[in-house]
Amino acid sequence: KDMLEGGAFGDSGAEIVIEETLYGEEASIHAIVSGDSFVCLPPSQDHKRAGEGDTGLNTGGMGAYTPTSRVTAEMQAAIEEAVIKPTIAGFKADGIEFNGTLYAGLMLTDHGVKVLEYNVRFGDPETQVLLPMVSDDLVPVLLASAKGEPLPEKLNFHDGAAIVIVLAAGGYPGSYPKGEIITFPKEIANRAAIVHAGTKRDEAGTITTNGGRVLSVSSQAPSLKEAAELAYSVCDQVNFESKYLRRDIGHRELNRK
Ligand code: GLY
């Protein structure tokens, strides 16, 4: 009713499509593409639900981590063969010159890997964990992709893992307050970063909330557990009145080990 009569999602909510339900865990595969060639970033997983234990409403993403043991090296190679390569060939067959980031959202089902969606952009919040893992200088690679020039054969990555925790405004993804003053720690460990999303800075330099997903805190460390401990310690030092975060980002991977 909200969609069809209330216009909840504008024109996008005017039509209902019924599809097969796929059960499993989602994984995100990012490929940087230049013409026929591509290089992949490590497989990542995000947590789309608002509530802990992956419950509640779907959001843009409440946190993410990389790598994931759910996508083995063999599976990654199979996904590149069965998903990424045919998609790039499809671009070509359709006369589309595609240079940029191809992000496939996948469902890892008991009946194999299924493609849920493609985006021609980096994932959010996956990017906040993928970029800290790259040990090469990524700028020349992105520039080569943008210009359709040759890419390196492969990218090099740090050992270990990365995690990102989203700090949302209370009520998100429903209605939420704006304009709350945000306070930050004076300094943070250099393996952590605070990334702004729904924030605003006034002329006096005061930073306030201005969106549902307000900020995210990412960290890269030798293990996912260490990355999570560091990221959550920074999350606890960033404050605004309605701050909401999930305390269980990475729980599947942490419990697998
Ligand atoms: N993490 C979901 C998205 O970027 O679409």
Image (tube, grey):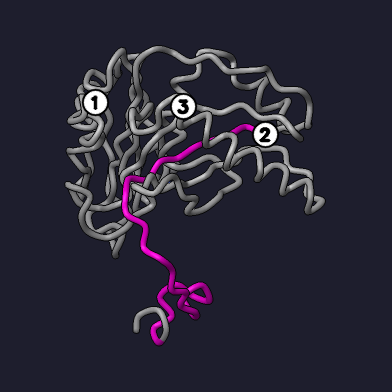
Residue 42 visible somewhere in the drawing: yes
Reply above or below: 63 against 191.
below
Using residue 127 as the reference point, say whether residue 90 is left or right of it.
Answer: right
Residue at label 1? Answer: 228
Q: How many marks?
A: 3
Task: Please tell me which of labels 2 and 1 falls first in the chain.
Answer: 2
Looking at the rendered image, the quarter that the N terminus falls into is: bottom left
Q: Identify the amino acid type marked 1.
A: Ala
Q: Which residue lies furthest to the bottom in this view?
A: 5
Residue at label 3? Answer: 74
Reply above or below: 120 against 238.
below
Q: Residue furthest right?
A: 95
Task: Please tell me which of labels 3 and 2 falls first in the chain.
Answer: 2
The residue positioned 78% from the left and 26% from the top of the image is 149
Q: Are marks 2 and 1 in contact (CB under 8 Å)?
A: no
The residue positioned 43% from the left and 74% from the top of the image is 18
- Badge 2: residue crowd in 10 Å (few <14, some 14–19, many ≥20): many
Of the pair 211 and 67, the residue shown nearer to us? 67
Q: Identify the amino acid type marked 2.
A: Val
Q: Give the range drawn in magenta.
A: 5-33
Using residue 94 as the reference point, say whether residue 152 is left or right of it.
Answer: left
